[in-house]
Amino acid sequence: MDRNAAHRMKRGLFKATHLILLFLAMAIICLPGLWIVLSSLRPTVEIMAKPPVWIPRQISFDAYVAMFSGVGQGGIPVIDYFTNSLIISVTSTVIALAVGMAGGYAFARYRFAFKSSIFLGFMLTRTVPGIALSLPLFFVYAKLGIIDTHFGLILAYVALNVPFTIWLIDGFFRQVPKDLAEAAQIDGCTRWQAFWQVEFPLARPGIASAGIFAFLISWNEFALASQLTRSTSSKTLPVGLLDYTAEFTIDWRGMCALAVVMIIPALTLTFIVQKHLVSGLTSGAVKG
Amino acid sequence: MKSWRLPAPYLLLLPAFIVLAAVVVVPLLLSLYSSFTPFRLTRPDSIWTFIGLRNYERLFTDWEFWVAFGRTVLLLTVALNLEMVLGLGLAVLVEKATRGQRLLRTIMMFPMMFSPVLVGFQFKFMFNDNIGLINNALQGLGLTDQAIPWLIDGTLAFIAILTAEIWSSTAVFAIFILAGLMAMPKEPVEAARVDGCTPWQTFRFVTWPYLMPFAFIAMTIRSLDIARAYDIVKIMTDGGPAKRTEILWTLIARTGYSDARMGLANAMAYIAILLSIVFTAMFFRQLAKARAQIAAEW
């Protein structure tokens, strides 16, 4: 009886601790994001208030209105930055996917000399720190005259994303049984047809998530973008965020609002792919 | 005569080769060359003066550079280890949850979507000595009466940067370790329990070896872009105050762009690249080892 009660209490205690810890962890994860959203909706006076105002007394969308109303009204050219970001990320993702599909297919389906060294070589190009790469790229781009153009950044981002898309897509093609494509070929498909009609549809969810991953990397990239862009003709959102910092002051509210604008597309896309992403990375790496 | 064609796999890999050669390999060769010159952006013809290893010699005796180098290694080591431990803890917590696991998993991935720039800015805001959430909370709870100068004091700034870095990247570890926990067969754990193992022993000798490859995948992925910490540091302190949080990458940016000493910056960049490669190669080998072990056991 006594032992039973003690055991039950221990279990209850254990469960309570688990819940508390879980709650704390989730709170720590969510709090910074929520704080940003909250700060973007309250007047600057409240952000600066001493003693701090915890619960907002009034909610306003002024920061967003100011942001989208153009340069003259104390905003920054957010719409330009947003379009730049979108064009650059989408284009580079599409190209990286095409290149990655070809490469991933080669790694998943063929045996060839130096296979693993080539794979490792591709991965090693990814380890080059962005800022270290930006030095020679800056010089080359300046010579070619493609600094501050969409083309320059797209090119850089394709190279940045290709190793990852190859890795992911390789993993997804491995999951598609080889027999299926072979059966199709026996039935008279060419290898090309077999790929598009059998293997591609099966690997499509995986490829889509590789695409979203590539999109997020381009969308969030800063080190290269900060050096290879100059003006509204190619500046992306992460670089635009710095427009809110003047020499000694920072427009916290404006920055928070821009942060929210930046995070929403990323948030939506990640929700869509979260499942495929992990399975692709693990299958590529564990069963390699 | 039959015309010779490139074998299919090489043909398929050709676009990747071209892109990576054009954007990564050739520029890096160029930067390797320019690291042997006193190249300055302001004097373009200085790229033709060859000075041999003088840039590197200078770096090897440059105290400031080695301090930044050491700080970078320290930051990475502490951050990666803490991220692994916290990620493991988080994964276990989520795995044990009986309800709402899907929701928890989604929330867990939340920080991964944040651009490092955003993370840097967000924590700069929270650690602000005057209006930051953290100081406000500490003062509100009466734990301290003055504002703690988080980003102004060298050590505290390092801690703040570390916090931001860990907040943003723990999710990577948690996700992969969780994937491992969920894929793990239940029998070995039960067998260990029947054989009288304590929970700790079960975890240490049964669960953990199984999870290791997953942890190393996460490590490898993280090590592929550890240099993203540059974004965070750049925004939070920009290497300040008085260079007390200067890391390798901010030093490179400063030397290359602000001081316009490209040659020297490229020499530093090469050392930074080697550092990244060492980190990645280390984890790749661990991954291969863990993978071989799993393959043998399955």
Image (cartoon, coloured by chain):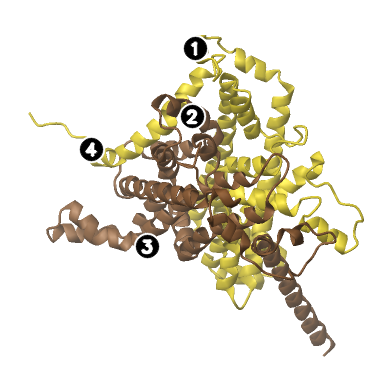
The nearer-to-camera label among 3 and 1 is 1
Callouts 4 and 1 close, C-beta under 8 Å: no
Please give the residue where the numbered disc 3 appears in the rendered image: A205
Badge 3 element: helix
Please give the residue where the numbered disc 1 appears in the rendered image: B45
- Find the distance from the CA under tag 3 to the CA under tag 2: 36 Å
**Residue A269 coordinates in the image, percent (x, y):** 47, 61
Q: Could you classify mark 3 by the number of other residues whose Cα lies within 10 Å: few (under 14), some (14-19), or many (20 or more)?
A: some
Quadrant in which residue B65 is drawn: top right
Tag of residue A138: 2
Q: Is residue A21 above or below residue B48?
A: below
Badge 3 sits on which subunit? A
- Residue lying at the far bottom of the rendered structure: A1
Please give the residue where the numbered disc 4 appears in the rendered image: B7
Badge 4 element: loop
Which of the two residues, B221 or B281, is positioned nearer the viewer here?
A: B221
Q: Which chain is brown?
A: A
**Residue A268 coordinates in the image, percent (x, y):** 49, 64
Tag of residue A14: none
- Find the distance from the CA under tag 1 to the CA under tag 2: 16 Å
Callouts 2 and 4 close, C-beta under 8 Å: no
On the question of residue A76 being in view, the answer is: no
Q: Earlier in the sequence, mark 4 or mark 1?
A: 4
Q: Which chain is yellow?
A: B
Q: As shown in the figure, which amino acid type bears the numbered disc 4?
A: Pro
